[in-house]
Image (cartoon, grey):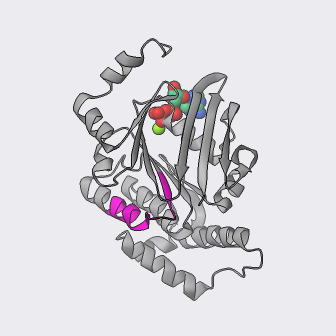
Amino acid sequence: MSQIEIKNLHVKIEGKEILKGVDLTIKQGEIHAIMGPNGTGKSTLAYTLMGHPAYEVTQGEVKFKGKDLLKLGADERSRLGVFLAFQYPVAIPGVTVANFLRSALNARRKAENKDDKGVSIPEFRKLLKEKMDLLKMNHDVAGRYLNDGFSGGEKKRAEILQLATLRPEIAILDETDSGLDIDALRIVSDGVNALTGPDLGVLVITHYQRLLNYIKPDFVHIMLDGRIVESGGPDLALHLEDQGYDWVREKYEDTVSA
Ligand code: ADP
Ligand code: MG
């Protein structure tokens, strides 16, 4: 059973402390949601876990599969089984979705077994089609350059397609709902739900409760000013939908720097 264990994580960006001591453990098979107002550090946590070089860890530790995750490069983290679906996916002109995914999948297989010969092209095509069907994506997407000229909804689906193909042990979904209309939201959520199970731990990051109507979390955490200030079950998300974030701000105003 793999788990990602975050302890007292402090992170700076451009000299400013954004994360001020985050503690969180996510096990395979669990779905956690982090909610919180904009600018509280949710994406910072996601990028830090994935190893974005701009985010400087000043204190704390993150362990995954017995390894010090913070010492590994982004590519090593990915091969090890941590996946991040970006809030703002970047385009990679010149690299097709199919080539990108096949390379990434082979790298991940090789990390698990160094003698792995890689997935054959027919085997990969079959896998990719199956996953595109799951996400109700047009098969033409496979031959397009990754995210290049993709609509907001297509980008989010392409992120989930990566998740479906790579089968990580821990997936972080940063604002996967933003830019999606209700139909696309349902398709993406159904896709995620089809992938969840005992092998996948998920961290869903969202500003709004609506995604959590589709992807049901086991645990809900509220982030405020770089800290997780409240943790609970799904009812916490419903409470936020009802009450907004004001009560959280009031409750923690003394501990939060202005
Ligand atoms: P959230 O995802 O919760 O909306 P972010 O983690 O994106 O919040 O941002 C937290 C804070 O860090 C914000 O004040 C934001 O302006 C700042 N920040 C994030 N990324 C950068 C960056 N690359 N350079 C400077 N400041 C940043
Ligand atoms: Mg964000």
108 on left or right of 32: right
Q: Nearer the viewer, residue 94 or 208?
A: 208
231 on left or right of 72: left
Residue 148 image point, x, y percent: 50, 59
Q: Nearer the viewer, residue 24 or 58?
A: 24
Per the rendered image, the range of residues in magenta is: 187-202
Instruction: Examine the image and state in which quarter residue 244 appears.
Output: top left
User: Does the image show residue 93?
Assistant: yes
User: Does the image show residue 147?
Assistant: no
Point out the image quarter for the N terminus: bottom right
Count all numbered tags in the image, as a single digit: 0
Q: Nearer the viewer, residue 107 or 171?
A: 171
Asked if residue 199 lies in the magenta stretch, the reply is yes
Residue drawn at x 57%, y 26% is 18
Is residue 133 depicted above or below 173 in this figure?
below
Residue 65 image point, x, y percent: 67, 56
Residue 186 image point, x, y percent: 29, 59
Asked if residue 216 lies in the magenta stretch, the reply is no
Residue drawn at x 56%, y 67% is 166
Is residue 51 depicted above or below 188 in this figure?
above
